[in-house]
Amino acid sequence: AFEHVHQTDVQTYLSQVNPAEGEIFSRAMTAMSKAVNEPLVAAYDFSSFQYVVDVGGGQGSVL
């Protein structure tokens, strides 16, 4: 539906068509991630792994 209304995909819209709205979206996603990431990292024992990769995109805030 978004592409039909705006004639572009969400990522292009937020990065090129309306970068101010894209910045708001990015800050909101980072803030929401922090609320989830801190308890996740505190609760899970990563010591058995040699490498851990944050593949979610965005700011890489888990690592």
Image (cartoon, grey):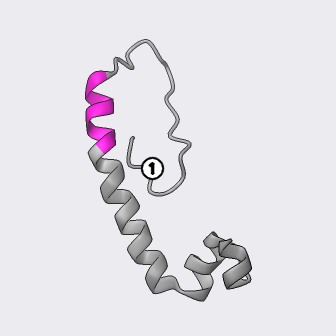
Tell me the crowding category of disc 1: few under 14, some 14 to 19, or many 20 or more residues within 10 angstroms, Cα based.
few
Q: Is residue 8 left or right of residue 54?
A: right
> Residue placed at 45% from the left, 81% from the top?
21
Is the stretch drawn in magenta largely helix, strand or loop? helix
Query: Magenta segment, which residues?
Result: 36-43
Residue at the disc numbered 1: 60
Q: Quadrant of residue 43?
A: top left
Q: Is residue 52 left or right of residue 16?
A: left
Determine whether 53 is above or below 50 in the image. below
The quarter of the picture where the C terminus appears is top left
| Disc 1 secondary structure class | loop
The quarter of the picture where the N terminus appears is bottom right
Q: Is residue 17 left or right of residue 61?
A: right
> Residue placed at 39% from the left, 20% from the top?
46
The foreground one among 58 and 51 is 58
Amino acid type of the residue that numbered disc 1 sits on in the rendered structure: Gly
Residue placed farthest to the top in the image? Answer: 48
Determine whether 6 is above or below 1 in the image. below
The foreground one among 40 and 45 is 40
Q: Quadrant of residue 7?
A: bottom right
Q: Quadrant of residue 44?
A: top left
Determine whether 45 is above or below 28 in the image. above
> Residue placed at 39% from the left, 75% from the top?
24
> Residue placed at 61% from the left, 80% from the top?
13
The reply to whether the magenta stretch includes residue 42 is yes
